[in-house]
Amino acid sequence: MQRWINRSSTLGENPKVDAFLAELVAVCRKHNLSVSHEDYQGGFEVAAFSEKNVAWLLDAADATDR
């Protein structure tokens, strides 16, 4: 999947990031919970499962040092 790569400021692919996020989504579905973002202080929160939260998570930028 194409995603923003921080270190190069371009769009690109990283199968390792895709696999990691896919496993996180599987865990979310298994437990019927989502990782969400709390905008007031920049922290994360665990919430009821939501496809909206899954889409947000899958849109994560790649900040790895491949």
Image (spheres, rainbow, N blue to C red):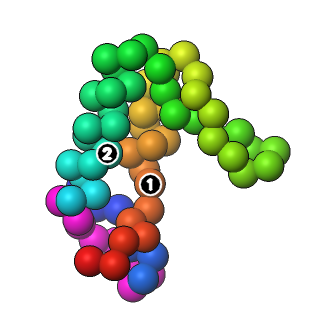
**Image: 9 above or below 20:** below
Counting from the top left corner in percent of width and height, residue 53 is at 50, 32
Q: Residue at x 49, y 41 (%)?
A: 56
Secondary structure at badge 2 equals helix
**42 or 4: nearer the eye?**
42
Q: Residue at x 44, y 62 (%)?
A: 61
* Contact between labelled residues 1 and 2, with CB atoms less than 8 Å apart: yes
Left or right: where 57 falls relative to 46:
left
CA distance separating discs 2 and 1: 9 Å
Q: Residues within 10 Å of mark 1 (few under 14, many from 20)?
A: some
Residue 66 in view (yes/no): yes
Residue 52 appears in the picture as rendered = no
Residue at the far right: name it. Answer: 40
Q: What amino acid does circle 1 point to?
A: Ala
Name the image quarter holding residue 30. top left
Q: Tell me which segment is drawn in magenta.
A: 8-15
Reading the chain from its start, which is encountered first: label 2 or label 1?
Answer: 2
Above/below status of 26 relative to 31: below
- Residue drawn at x 74%, y 44% is 39
Residue 48, image quadrant: top right
Quarter of the rendering occupied by the C terminus: bottom left
Report the disc number at residue 21: 2
Residue 9 image position (x, y, % from top left):
44, 81
Q: In the rendered view, does 25 fall on the left or right side of 61?
A: left
- Verify whether residue 59 appears in magenta: no
What's the residue type where badge 2 is placed?
Leu
For numbered disc 1, what is the local secondary structure?
loop
In this rendering, is residue 24 above or below 63?
above
Residue located at (34% from left, 37% from top): 24
* Circle count: 2
Residue density around tag 2, few if under 14, some if 14–19, many if 20 or more, within 10 Å: some
Check residue 60 in the rendering and tell me which mark sits there, or answer none. 1
